[in-house]
Amino acid sequence: MQKWVLRTQASNNCAAACGHGHTVCVTGAGGFIASWLVKLLLEKGYTVRGTVRNPDDDEKNAHLRSLDGAAEQLTLVRADLLDMESLAAAFRGCQGVFHAASPVTDDPEKMIEPAVEGTKNVIHAAADVGGVRRVVFTSSIGTVYMGSHHAPGAEVDETCWSDLDYCRNTKNWYCYAKTVAEQVAWELAEQRQLDLVVVNPSLVLGPLLQPSVNASSCHILKYLDGSVKTYADAVQAYVHVRDVRDAWVYEEPSACGQYLCAGHVLHRGEVCRILAKMFPEYPVPTECKGGAGETKKGCRFSSRRLAELGVGVAPASLCLHDTVNSLQVKGLLPRRTTAVADPPVIS
Ligand SMILES: NC(=O)c1ccc[n+]([C@@H]2O[C@H](COP(=O)([O-])OP(=O)(O)OC[C@H]3O[C@@H](n4cnc5c(N)ncnc54)[C@H](OP(=O)(O)O)[C@@H]3O)[C@@H](O)[C@H]2O)c1
């Protein structure tokens, strides 16, 4: 299918619609990535409406309410992805919509419907209310690389789609749901003449603003808290949460289509070795599961589209360092006594 729609005329006004005096909505505002987005948007002077499922949960929302500018510029509104009316109410009067809400799980019962129907609802609601100039959808690199059609080491870019049969057969319901959701988003945006831009991050790490551990931070926590004794023969690309450029693609008039935000690809063994070097006080696994060694080689993710626009990504070592440091500061990972080394630089 066609990978992106051309920008509509309305999007050309986007740069003029940035910051002070403009209202934008962020779905799933309390999540890991969205919390950083809300923080940045407030710093830029936007009036922000954040959707949460329970605005009365003071503990869960405290990190949002305590952001600089939140008292004056942030409103939390109740919305569920499966309730289109609640989304439309949240989007009314907004010039921009950032769609970041989604379950992050491999449980098909919990994942598929909110990701796919929820994204449909977001696009329809944004089109129905009128006045929304651009929708920025936080998708995933899981929509482009999953499948056996990419040879190890091959470069994957924004022209690729993941193989849905492969996702189904391997029960990778997260990638399946995100791929279907993104395909549906492009189809509906074209039908509804809505300006859609998609950001596709790899696994996102960095400091947490929210009070609890999200799935991608848990991916690192498990190597430090003793809950796993080995690492998988698998590879992954990592990107820093500050390098997920949703706000940037919203403001950039020429932004269109998809932007892979993939960072560096590391084998799990390499991740563990970096963690062990930086944080030798934790029981980081030293052996690869299965005994066959580190055989897996991943794709290479093109960051050409972002790079052409002058956007770079932080080294993976910094992603790991900032995640662990934040887990410690928040008391989600008990501190141990040995001093922490400076992060080694991985290019
Ligand atoms: N973190 C990563 O490594 C990564 C990588 C690539 C792409 N992404 C994508 O980035 C987005 C944000 O991920 P994240 O890591 O920040 O996730 P997260 O911390 O788990 O946050 C997900 C948010 O979605 C909300 N949500 C879930 N189901 C919902 C529903 N039915 N209605 C309304 N809100 C709902 C959650 O609200 P509650 O708090 O009420 O549960 C939460 O605020 C997702 O679309 C994810 O697929 C993440």
Image (spheres, grey):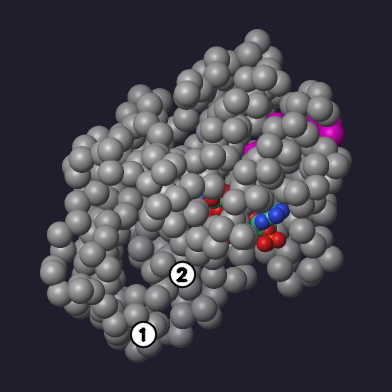
Q: Callout 2: helix, strand or loop?
A: helix
Residue shown at 82% from the left, 38% from the top: 88
Question: Which numbered dot is residue 29?
Answer: none
Residue shown at 57% from the left, 27% from the top: 186
Q: Which residue is mark 1?
A: 226
Residue shown at 38% from the left, 55% from the top: 170
Q: Amino acid at mark 1?
A: Gly
In the drawing, does residue 83 fall left or right of residue 250? right
- The magenta-colored residue range is 92-98
Residue shown at 41% from the left, 63% from the top: 322
In the drawing, does residue 210 fall left or right of residue 303? right
Question: Which numbered dot is residue 218?
Answer: 2
Residue 286 spot, x, y in % from top left: 20, 78
Residue 302 spot, x, y in % from top left: 31, 34
Residue 93 spot, x, y in % from top left: 84, 32
Tell me, yes or no, whether the highlighted magenta stretch contains residue 56: no
In this view, 110 is above or below 138: below
| Marks 2 and 1, how far apart at CA | 12 Å
